[in-house]
Amino acid sequence: MQKFNIYPSPQWLIVLCGFVCCILGTSIPDISGIIHLELLENFYITDVQAAWAGSIFNSMFMISGPIGSLLTNTFSCRVCIITGSVVGLVGFGLTSLTENIYIMYVTYGLIAGTSQSLIYTGVLISVGYYFDKGRSIATGVVVNGCGVAMLALPPIMHQCVSSFGIHGAFLLIGAAFFQCAVFGALMRPNSVEMNSRKEKKTKNTEELYDNQCVRLGNSIRNSLSELGTVEFFLFCISSFCWNVSFNISILYFPKYFKTNGVSKYDVSYLISATGIGNICGRYLVGLAASDREIGSRLLYFGQFSLIGIFTLFLPFYKNYAIQFLYMTAFGMYTGGVWILQTVIVVELVSLSNLASGFGIVMFCGGLGQLAVPLIAEILEDNIDNVKDIDLSKAFAVSGSLYILSAILCALTARKPSSKCSSVTNVMLDDENKTHNDIELIGELEMELFIDKR
């Protein structure tokens, strides 16, 4: 195998650049509610029209993941990050120049929405190539940039809108995305990435094609048998439900609090509270999930049941301090869902089908986020002779769907996990015990793949 004489970036630089890219290029969905409120106040549009813009943008983060994977496999992680930053600049730049909401569906929703997925995918795959040992720690440090952004971005966004208007804020967001190109350029491919790509290119195409045909047939047959279970179907519906709820929450929190007498300035700090909870939630769920005696589905059920109940009582939280505590709890109980979601997929469809299973679950989640404008249209009412969404009903739906998602996930536990999938089941014979140990080791390797997705 040919070796490349290249000068890779230091590992600390990869972590630093990835951390900054997560802050600048992947965290705008957390302030999409503030953008939603500004669109309503600055354009002559209905709530449903504004909801379509935010929902398309948020859903593209989940739906366009395969595009990022294609770029990294064809070119490099650095090219993927730089491409995402340029696409983000173009998307937000064009959005700052238009006042037509339908054009924004393309520029803000599709173009800018795709850019964040490209940056996120390129960053995490690059971290995976650079770290053989301590990979989970490095990835955890990088993705905590998202939590830091949730904490810092809402007040910054409020200040940008106050000073430069929504169009100027869009332009500044595009400029922030473009800075990811600088940090992405510093994340040079190392020998592992380069030699892996070179080895793939030099393989005999015909032989590779024949082998892949056989493997594809076997893979499809095995995947269909695993993915066609009732339990996996229920979990896909669960993912759809909680993404509907989550998108309702992040889109309508700012508008809800503002209509209840909270100033825009104070609303920005309420949104920041989710960042505090998010950072704590990721850490606590990670600790709890590492305990083999605590089931991942039990954690999933508990988190969404609690946040669903808390959300149902949201109209009764009149005090700002209580609202702040609720938003902190919201960030805490939703922050660790990504960890649990991927672990549950492995338990349901086995480690060998993780890529297919997780992709389907993510796609269902993206569809859930796209469903929010349809729900908003159903909940529209004539308030003071103006069509507007009934926010109390919206959050009642949101809370109910959180609880439904928890129940659907609990129903997946009515049968034992799929073969070769669970590292938490008690093994009764020596052969299964040995197999369990092997999969426990494989779980550490699986963490990298999860973060790549």
Image (cartoon, rainbow, N blue to C red):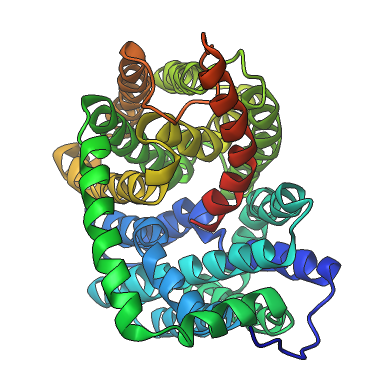
Judged left or right of residue 336, residue 345 is left
In the image, is residue 292 above or below residue 366?
above
| Foreground of the two, 377 or 121 | 121
Question: Which quarter of the rendering shows the N terminus?
Answer: bottom right
Asked if one can make out residue 303 in the rendered structure from this viewpoint, the answer is: yes
**Residue 439 % position (x, y):** 56, 34
Judged left or right of residue 63, residue 158 is right
**Residue 309 % position (x, y):** 43, 15
Q: Residue at x 68, y 80 (%)?
A: 189
The furthest residue to the top: 428
Asked if one can make out residue 270 in the rendered structure from this viewpoint, the answer is: no
Judged left or right of residue 121, residue 53 is left
**Residue 242 % position (x, y):** 36, 34
In the image, is residue 190 above or below residue 436?
below
Q: Residue at x 44, y 36 (%)?
A: 346
| Foreground of the two, 341 or 418 | 418
**Residue 356 % position (x, y):** 33, 50
Q: Quadrant of residue 410?
A: top left
Please give the count of numbered marks on the rendered protein. Answer: 0
Q: Quadrant of residue 437?
A: top right
Q: Residue at x 35, y 56 (%)?
A: 59
Q: Residue at x 18, y 46 (%)?
A: 374
| Foreground of the two, 362 or 96 | 362
In the image, is residue 293 above or below residue 231?
above
Judged left or right of residue 381, residue 438 is right
| Foreground of the two, 375 or 293 | 293
